[in-house]
Amino acid sequence: MVKFVGKINTAVFISGRGSNLKNLIKFSEKKISPIKIILVVTNNKNAKGLNFAKNKKIPFLINNFKNKTLSENKTIKRIKKNKIELICLAGFMKILTSNFIKKYKHPILNIHPSLLPKYKGLNTHQRVINNNEQFTGSTVHLVNSKLDSGKIILQRKIKILKNDNPKTLEKKILKLEHKLYPDAILKLLANF
Protein backbone atom coordinates (compact mmCIF):
# COMPACT_ATOMS: atom_id res chain seq x y z
CA MET A 1 0.00 0.00 0.00
CA VAL A 2 1.29 3.46 -0.89
CA LYS A 3 1.93 5.85 2.00
CA PHE A 4 1.07 9.46 1.21
CA VAL A 5 2.66 12.46 2.85
CA GLY A 6 -0.30 14.59 3.83
CA LYS A 7 -3.69 14.43 2.16
CA ILE A 8 -4.74 16.32 -0.92
CA ASN A 9 -7.66 18.73 -0.83
CA THR A 10 -10.60 17.16 -2.59
CA ALA A 11 -14.04 18.33 -3.69
CA VAL A 12 -16.91 15.93 -4.38
CA PHE A 13 -19.69 16.96 -6.78
CA ILE A 14 -23.13 15.39 -6.23
CA SER A 15 -26.72 15.77 -7.40
CA GLY A 16 -28.71 13.25 -5.37
CA ARG A 17 -28.62 10.75 -2.52
CA GLY A 18 -24.84 10.91 -2.09
CA SER A 19 -24.05 7.26 -1.32
CA ASN A 20 -20.69 7.56 -3.13
CA LEU A 21 -20.04 10.81 -1.22
CA LYS A 22 -20.76 9.03 2.08
CA ASN A 23 -18.42 6.23 1.05
CA LEU A 24 -15.66 8.67 -0.03
CA ILE A 25 -15.97 10.52 3.31
CA LYS A 26 -15.47 7.19 5.13
CA PHE A 27 -12.51 6.41 2.88
CA SER A 28 -10.98 9.87 3.46
CA GLU A 29 -10.95 9.23 7.21
CA LYS A 30 -8.70 6.15 6.84
CA LYS A 31 -4.94 6.42 7.36
CA ILE A 32 -4.19 4.97 3.92
CA SER A 33 -6.40 7.52 2.19
CA PRO A 34 -4.61 10.23 0.20
CA ILE A 35 -7.62 12.58 0.17
CA LYS A 36 -9.22 15.08 2.50
CA ILE A 37 -12.71 16.17 1.43
CA ILE A 38 -12.98 19.86 2.16
CA LEU A 39 -15.80 20.85 -0.18
CA VAL A 40 -19.02 19.37 -1.57
CA VAL A 41 -20.59 20.96 -4.65
CA THR A 42 -24.14 20.30 -5.79
CA ASN A 43 -26.55 21.55 -8.43
CA ASN A 44 -29.53 20.45 -6.30
CA LYS A 45 -30.37 22.29 -3.07
CA ASN A 46 -32.48 19.27 -2.04
CA ALA A 47 -29.74 16.68 -2.62
CA LYS A 48 -29.95 14.16 0.23
CA GLY A 49 -26.18 13.81 0.05
CA LEU A 50 -25.81 17.28 1.58
CA ASN A 51 -26.77 15.69 4.90
CA PHE A 52 -23.48 13.73 4.87
CA ALA A 53 -21.56 16.97 4.33
CA LYS A 54 -23.51 18.70 7.11
CA ASN A 55 -22.98 15.78 9.54
CA LYS A 56 -19.22 15.92 8.97
CA LYS A 57 -19.15 19.75 8.92
CA ILE A 58 -17.79 19.78 5.36
CA PRO A 59 -18.50 23.12 3.66
CA PHE A 60 -20.74 22.92 0.60
CA LEU A 61 -21.62 25.05 -2.39
CA ILE A 62 -25.05 24.99 -4.05
CA ASN A 63 -25.13 26.13 -7.67
CA ASN A 64 -28.16 25.31 -9.81
CA PHE A 65 -26.07 25.42 -13.03
CA LYS A 66 -29.00 27.01 -14.92
CA ASN A 67 -26.55 29.68 -16.03
CA LYS A 68 -23.60 27.36 -16.68
CA THR A 69 -20.96 30.05 -17.17
CA LEU A 70 -21.91 31.89 -13.99
CA SER A 71 -22.16 28.68 -11.93
CA GLU A 72 -18.90 27.26 -13.24
CA ASN A 73 -17.03 30.53 -12.61
CA LYS A 74 -18.40 30.66 -9.07
CA THR A 75 -17.36 27.03 -8.55
CA ILE A 76 -13.85 27.55 -9.99
CA LYS A 77 -13.36 30.58 -7.74
CA ARG A 78 -14.30 28.53 -4.64
CA ILE A 79 -12.15 25.59 -5.75
CA LYS A 80 -9.09 27.82 -6.23
CA LYS A 81 -9.70 29.51 -2.87
CA ASN A 82 -9.80 26.07 -1.20
CA LYS A 83 -6.71 24.82 -3.11
CA ILE A 84 -8.63 21.78 -4.41
CA GLU A 85 -6.25 19.33 -6.13
CA LEU A 86 -8.77 16.62 -7.02
CA ILE A 87 -12.44 16.69 -8.00
CA CYS A 88 -14.53 13.52 -7.72
CA LEU A 89 -17.84 13.52 -9.56
CA ALA A 90 -20.19 11.19 -7.69
CA GLY A 91 -23.62 11.13 -9.28
CA PHE A 92 -23.25 14.71 -10.49
CA MET A 93 -25.92 15.06 -13.18
CA LYS A 94 -24.49 18.09 -14.99
CA ILE A 95 -21.87 18.05 -17.73
CA LEU A 96 -18.88 20.29 -17.03
CA THR A 97 -17.92 22.47 -19.99
CA SER A 98 -14.52 22.24 -21.69
CA ASN A 99 -13.94 25.77 -20.37
CA PHE A 100 -14.26 24.50 -16.76
CA ILE A 101 -11.99 21.52 -17.50
CA LYS A 102 -9.33 23.82 -19.05
CA LYS A 103 -9.44 26.29 -16.15
CA TYR A 104 -9.08 23.54 -13.55
CA LYS A 105 -5.53 22.20 -13.90
CA HIS A 106 -5.88 19.08 -11.71
CA PRO A 107 -7.53 15.68 -12.23
CA ILE A 108 -11.31 15.37 -12.35
CA LEU A 109 -12.58 11.83 -11.78
CA ASN A 110 -16.01 10.45 -12.60
CA ILE A 111 -17.62 7.15 -11.74
CA HIS A 112 -19.95 5.70 -14.35
CA PRO A 113 -22.26 2.65 -13.98
CA SER A 114 -21.17 0.73 -17.08
CA LEU A 115 -18.10 -0.83 -18.62
CA LEU A 116 -16.97 2.13 -20.66
CA PRO A 117 -16.59 2.77 -23.55
CA LYS A 118 -19.94 0.93 -23.75
CA TYR A 119 -23.13 2.62 -22.54
CA LYS A 120 -22.09 6.22 -22.05
CA GLY A 121 -24.73 8.59 -20.71
CA LEU A 122 -27.95 7.72 -18.89
CA ASN A 123 -30.20 4.64 -18.41
CA THR A 124 -27.23 2.30 -18.60
CA HIS A 125 -28.82 -0.60 -16.68
CA GLN A 126 -31.89 -0.71 -18.92
CA ARG A 127 -29.77 -0.52 -22.08
CA VAL A 128 -27.45 -3.30 -20.85
CA ILE A 129 -30.47 -5.57 -20.22
CA ASN A 130 -32.13 -4.63 -23.53
CA ASN A 131 -28.96 -5.69 -25.36
CA ASN A 132 -28.70 -9.03 -23.51
CA GLU A 133 -25.21 -8.28 -22.21
CA GLN A 134 -23.62 -11.00 -20.07
CA PHE A 135 -21.61 -8.55 -17.96
CA THR A 136 -21.89 -5.01 -16.70
CA GLY A 137 -20.00 -3.03 -14.13
CA SER A 138 -18.59 0.34 -13.28
CA THR A 139 -15.75 2.55 -14.50
CA VAL A 140 -13.77 5.35 -12.91
CA HIS A 141 -12.30 7.62 -15.57
CA LEU A 142 -10.68 11.01 -15.97
CA VAL A 143 -13.07 13.68 -17.21
CA ASN A 144 -12.39 15.33 -20.55
CA SER A 145 -14.56 17.46 -22.82
CA LYS A 146 -16.41 14.42 -24.28
CA LEU A 147 -19.10 12.63 -22.27
CA ASP A 148 -17.78 9.54 -20.43
CA SER A 149 -14.77 9.37 -22.75
CA GLY A 150 -11.72 10.18 -20.61
CA LYS A 151 -8.85 7.84 -19.80
CA ILE A 152 -10.05 4.82 -17.79
CA ILE A 153 -8.39 4.52 -14.39
CA LEU A 154 -10.12 1.37 -13.14
CA GLN A 155 -13.04 -0.91 -14.03
CA ARG A 156 -14.79 -3.79 -12.29
CA LYS A 157 -17.38 -6.08 -13.80
CA ILE A 158 -20.16 -8.33 -12.56
CA LYS A 159 -22.16 -11.05 -14.26
CA ILE A 160 -25.74 -10.24 -15.18
CA LEU A 161 -28.08 -12.92 -13.88
CA LYS A 162 -31.24 -14.08 -15.67
CA ASN A 163 -33.50 -12.51 -13.03
CA ASP A 164 -31.67 -9.15 -12.96
CA ASN A 165 -33.56 -5.97 -13.82
CA PRO A 166 -32.45 -2.31 -13.81
CA LYS A 167 -33.20 -1.98 -10.06
CA THR A 168 -31.23 -5.09 -9.02
CA LEU A 169 -28.32 -4.06 -11.27
CA GLU A 170 -28.34 -0.56 -9.80
CA LYS A 171 -28.03 -2.00 -6.27
CA LYS A 172 -25.25 -4.42 -7.21
CA ILE A 173 -23.29 -1.79 -9.11
CA LEU A 174 -23.60 0.78 -6.33
CA LYS A 175 -22.06 -1.76 -3.95
CA LEU A 176 -19.30 -2.37 -6.50
CA GLU A 177 -18.72 1.40 -6.87
CA HIS A 178 -18.17 1.82 -3.13
CA LYS A 179 -15.03 -0.34 -3.40
CA LEU A 180 -14.04 0.78 -6.90
CA TYR A 181 -13.90 4.56 -6.34
CA PRO A 182 -11.41 4.47 -3.42
CA ASP A 183 -9.27 1.89 -5.28
CA ALA A 184 -9.23 4.12 -8.37
CA ILE A 185 -8.21 7.15 -6.31
CA LEU A 186 -5.35 5.18 -4.76
CA LYS A 187 -4.26 4.00 -8.21
CA LEU A 188 -4.44 7.48 -9.74
CA LEU A 189 -2.58 9.24 -6.94
CA ALA A 190 0.09 6.53 -6.67
CA ASN A 191 1.16 7.64 -10.17
CA PHE A 192 1.39 11.35 -9.33
Image (cartoon, rainbow, N blue to C red):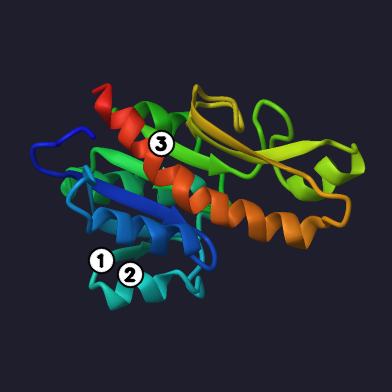
- Indicate which label's residue lies in the foreground, 3 or 2: 3
Q: Residues within 10 Å of mark 3 (few under 14, many from 20)?
A: many
Give percent across and percent down for residue 81: 17, 48
Label annotation for residue 59 = 1
Q: Is there a contact, CB below 8 Å, between mark 1 and mark 2? A: yes
Left or right of 101, for residue 15: right
Left or right of 18, for residue 156: right
- Nearer to us in this view, 25 or 47: 25
Label 3 – label 1 distance at C-alpha: 24 Å
Q: How crowded is mark 2: few (under 14 residues within 10 Å), some or many (20 or more)?
A: many
For label 3, the residue is 184
Q: In this view, does 191 lie above or below 9?
A: above
Determine the secondary structure under disc 2.
Answer: helix
For label 2, the residue is 53
Q: Which amino acid does label 3 sit on?
A: Ala
- Nearer to us in this view, 78 or 165: 165
Determine the secondary structure under disc 1.
Answer: loop
Q: Is residue 148 above or below residue 7?
A: above
